[in-house]
Image: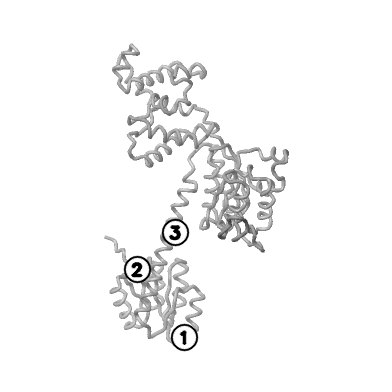
Amino acid sequence: MADSRPRILVVDDNPKMVSLLVDELVDAGYAVDTAAGGEAAIAAVRAEAFDLVITDLRMEKVDGLDVLKAARAVDEALPVMIMTAFGAVESAVEAIRAGAYHYFTKPFKIEEVLVFVGRAVADRRMRDENRALRKVAVERHGFASMVGRSDAMRRVYDAIERVAPSPATVLVRGESGVGKELVARALHFAGPRKDGAFVAVNCTALPEPLLESELFGHVRGAFTGAATVRRGLFLEADRGTLFLDEIGDMPAGLQPKLLRVLEEGEVRPIGADAPRKIEVRVIAATNQDLEQRVRDGTFRADLFYRLNVVQIAVPALRDRVDDIPVLFEAFLAKALARNPASRVTALAPEVIRLLSRCPWPGNVRELENVVERLVILSAGAEVQLADVEAHAAFLLADGSPLARAKSELMPLKQLEREYMAWVVAKCGGNKVKAAEILQIDLSTIYRRGKSAQ
């Protein structure tokens, strides 16, 4: 079994000092390695992973400052503590400036040393956990959260890769439900601000007075009901990203205030005497024709130009039908994870074919909702056309393949196959009964079912 104890490297050319520290640290529950000098210590930190390095400052040939520099070159987050004689405090301060976690003078109290060792190791573990969480966040909110292999989506991925490193304002355009916020999150987590906050606000969700306070904040007593200070989303997103969804619906009265923030890089909370500097990347999204709104006079032209520095267009689902089977697979897994009591394990091939031909005016969001609805409400292990008819009838003309054939031309073999599957589903999966209704051999149903897979 792997040793889960925090691992510490003790560096000193005085064997008695090393022995004293090792005994106390081991008794305190740490795993301890030793190095008899600076050269050995540097070799050790380059070869092994440690949670903390404790090194003497004054050593022959290679001193503690050299060990500190080498350790930080290998791992900038690795804490290094310096031991020094009382008369060399000035050099210890220099080590702190160079990035040492802490220093203590000889002779030292072991209780004090153990306190700072505990803090250093805890800080190290916390940083490692945060790094792991950030990695998960990138996987969850970055490219991994975007599903699709079509040429249309590859162009979106390419645009994100080129734009993410830049601080430029981005305007994400596309119909409702195409995944504009996913693009915004991918831009954030693939860029230099990934360690900062990603803050999102829907500009249609709040009336103008509340939206102004939400965005810019307010001081106490700024208006009736302002009993406490509100920082505002711009300040919350400082050194991160602010995502303004449905920017086309931003009230006219707030548009010049937003423009000023974009131009000046500062925000003035309601009732505040002075503005505050901020460093925020703004990503806006809209499903509207902003150019037409500019011509109509309902959206400021100068604000539009400020927002439209870089534009990324997200395709509608009907323009990326090749991605629909992949989306089914992803959304089915997601829905099953959220609904572990469901008996569903798959969608019947004819259901996938049917759903792939639907217009999906609500785009990816509508598709995901339909898949989850079928996972929750379908009774069998495989979602059938009858389940679609019962729980998502709006996807069918009047509930049967025959009805769809009146408005949608299809090959006769396909119609026959889908109608056969639909009858089987209407019979609750009883193929014998379906064969009797269809007046065909049972073997024909099995044969056609296999040819459809």
Compare marks 1 and 2 and give the one earlier in the sequence.
2
Residue pointed to by mark 1: 88
Looking at the image, the residue that sits furthest to the left is: 1
In this view, the residue in front, 276 or 440, is 276
For the C terminus, which image quadrant? top left
The quadrant holding residue 25 is bottom left
The quadrant holding residue 13 is bottom left
Q: Secondary structure at mark 2?
A: strand
Give the Cα separation between the discs numbered 1 and 2. 28 Å
The label shown at residue 7 is 2
Depth check, mark 2 against mark 3: the one in front is 3
Looking at the image, the residue that sits furthest to the bottom is: 87
Q: Amino acid at mark 2?
A: Arg
Find residue 357 and report its horizontal and vertical position in percent: 49, 26
Q: Secondary structure at mark 3?
A: helix
For the N terminus, which image quadrant? bottom left
Identify which residue is drawn at 37% across, 23% down: 451
Q: Amino acid at mark 3?
A: Arg
Residue pointed to by mark 3: 131
- Can you say whether 119 is above or below 382 in the image? below
In this view, the residue in front, 381 or 275, is 275
Give the Cα separation between the discs numbered 1 and 3. 36 Å
Task: Assess disc 3: are there few (<14), some (14-19) or many (≥20) residues with their C-alpha within 10 Å of its C-alpha.
Answer: few
Q: Amino acid at mark 1?
A: Ala
Q: How many marks?
A: 3
Find residue 356 and report its horizontal and vertical position in percent: 47, 29
